[in-house]
Amino acid sequence: MRTFVKTLPLKYLVTILLIVTFAVTTQTGLFYGKSGGHHGRPDGMNRNQISRDRNPNTMSVFPEFNEFQRTGNSTIAGSFPTREKNNTHVYFGLAMVALMLFHILQHWSWFKKFFTLKLILNNKLLFATGVFFVLMAISGIFLWLEIVPRNVMNFKGIHEFTSYGLIGLILIHIIQKLTWYYHATIKLFKAKKPLTA
């Protein structure tokens, strides 16, 4: 089992899936998170949600979406982060965390030596990426589950700051690994030479 986890095809697959989940999570976070609604609870509710008013023909609204106007047919004009889009960010983010844990497992022989001062000093960029990733993941999960009240600690600020930093760090990491991606792709997908008579 351990050998299978460390095979090139599985490492390649996990890496590609990490890049895809990173891209989708980044895109949904950047474009749907501006209104403050992309970190919804698992049940789709929000502590800041205003309850339905007395008019049964109107909908409940979120304070952070005050730039959108209510129309005559009780719909909201404009496009804002719907629950489905919120869930896309959350689910792909959770998938990225799971894939990253599996990625660490695949390289555990290297990672278990990572927390030595010498290795940290020789891999400052990778260490910073790891720290930013852990802070981003924990703050995102805390926001999603609302484990700690938002007035106690600004997890949204931590999540946004670490996410922006992580985007740059991961892009640098991907660029540094371009040679590996190229050679792994060639090795896995190169056409086998036909047998000659």
Image: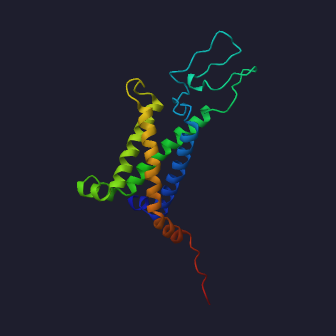
Given the current orientation, which residue lies at the most extreme bottom position? Answer: 197
Q: Nearer the viewer, residue 22 or 32?
A: 32
Residue 79's x, y, as percent?
66, 33
> Looking at the image, is 193 positioned above or below residue 50?
below
Residue in the picture at 75% in, 19% down: 72
What sort of colour scheme is used for the picture? rainbow
> Looking at the image, is 175 positioned above or below residue 18?
below
Residue in the picture at 40% in, 38% down: 138
Horizontal arrangement in the rendering, residue 20 relative to residue 98 (left or right): right
Q: Nearer the viewer, residue 102 or 56?
A: 56
Residue 2's x, y, as percent?
38, 58
Q: Quadrant of residue 34?
A: top right
Which quarter of the rendering shows the C terminus?
bottom right
> Looking at the image, is 128 positioned above or below residue 8?
above
Given the current orientation, which residue lies at the most extreme right position? Answer: 73
Residue 181's x, y, as percent?
49, 64
Residue in the picture at 53% in, 45% down: 26
Given the current orientation, which residue lies at the most extreme left position? Answer: 117
Given the current orientation, which residue lies at the most extreme front position? Answer: 67
Q: Is residue 113 visible?
A: no
Which quarter of the rendering shows the N terminus?
bottom left
Residue in the picture at 41% in, 32% down: 155
> Looking at the image, is 89 positioned above or below residue 37?
below
Q: Is residue 51 visible?
A: yes
Q: Quadrant of residue 133?
A: top left
Residue 69's x, y, as percent?
68, 23
Q: How many marks?
A: 0
